[in-house]
Amino acid sequence: MVISIYIKYFILICFIYIQIDAKDIFPTFKLKSVGFVNDFVIDKNHLYAANDMGVVDIFDIKKKQIVKQIVLPPLTTSMNKLIAPNILSVDYINNKVLIVSIGKSSYTNVWIYENNELKNIINEEKKLSIKEARFLDDKKIIFGTLGSEVILRDTTENYNVYKIHISYSALGDMTLSDDKQEIIVVDEGGEVKLIDAKSSKVKKSFKAQNVDNIFHVAFKNGVVLTAGQDRRMAVYVKNQKPYYIKNDFLVYCVGLSPSAKVGVFSRGEENYLQLFNPKTKEFTDRLVGHKAPPNNIIFINEKELFSSDARREIFYWRID
């Protein structure tokens, strides 16, 4: 009985210590895009930010400034007005930039920028509603459509290697593993599927922890995080029972460090980012500074990350 009391006391002291040790972290610096940022990707010392003004801003991270811009041609409306196309997605590989933008008919255009030339590889006349696109390699691109189709396209021969329909619900988000061998796809029904990127085979369907639309997914080192409209942040760790953390506000965004030892998710109406350990469920520090719901989080190593929201600023954070 006495031992049991001491154990409880010890646990309480540890919990208090953890809570006291946790702190608020503020951004070290901010990058400013010319428009509201929808997506960004990082390659070494450069960050490529896609915005709603039809521009991909290329930032030098060390200089903390825009060093180049990729500008898409404007759209002509039915009233003969010129407007900037909204860019939904951006990716980078070996000096190539992949861009998905909305056309005047609400269908999407896909572009590749290489050697200072912008090439339209898929025209909106194809009537595709592509939500995002990622390079699989130099020659192949993975597309995810709003209709939950996953398409692997060979850009050298201009044909689809495969085109599969993976859900009856609309696509929520998709992401590739770091080695580009696997794809995690999530949908508005709360489903999470692991797909072999080269063969399109569904390798695993996870036991859903979300019961509504999944906004965002992160996938690193075998760990999967999802952010949902149902106010749940779900965690799938290999050889461990999946679980979710219930919040008092919609969860818009998630992120993982390269080792997956550090997870982060948007939490609360104040739009702060909560750091935690996916395996132990332990909450640690908070990242404070966003004024709108975050929409993308990218770690560049275990201690540094960038995040954006539907505004012009991209935040740089350094964590302990």
Image: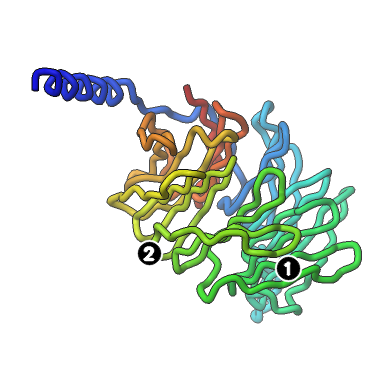
Kindly indicate the quadrant of the structure image that contains residue 313: top right
Q: In this view, does 144 lie above or below 237?
A: below
Q: How far apart are the two marked residues, 1 and 2, measured between alpha carbons?
A: 32 Å
Asked whether the viewer can see residue 138, the reply is yes
Q: How many labels does the image show?
A: 2
Side (left or right) of 254 relative to 106: left
Q: Give 241 or 304, whichever is nearer the viewer.
A: 241
| Residue 173 picture location, percent across and down | 56, 59
Q: Mark 2 points at which residue?
A: 211
Instruction: Report the residue marked by disc 1.
Output: 109
Residue sitting at 65 percent across and 61 percent down? 132
**Can you tell which of label 1 and label 2 is closer to the viewer?**
2
Q: What residue type is labelled 1?
A: Asn
The residue depicted at 69 percent of the width and 44 percent of the height is 48
Q: Is mark 2 on a helix, strand or loop?
A: loop
Instruction: Give percent across and percent down for residue 92.
Output: 75, 47
Q: Position of residue 27 (x, y in %)?
A: 48, 30
* Residue at x 60%, y 30% (from the top left corner): 301
Question: Residue 171 falls in which quadrant of the image?
Answer: bottom right
Residue 122 lies, with reference to residue 99, above or below; the image says: below
Where does residue 292 sit, x and y in percent of width and height?
42, 49
Single out the residue that lies furthest toward the left.
1
Work out which quarter of the rendered image holds the N terminus and state it.
top left
State which tag comes first along the sequence, 1 or 2: 1
Q: What residue type is labelled 2?
A: Val
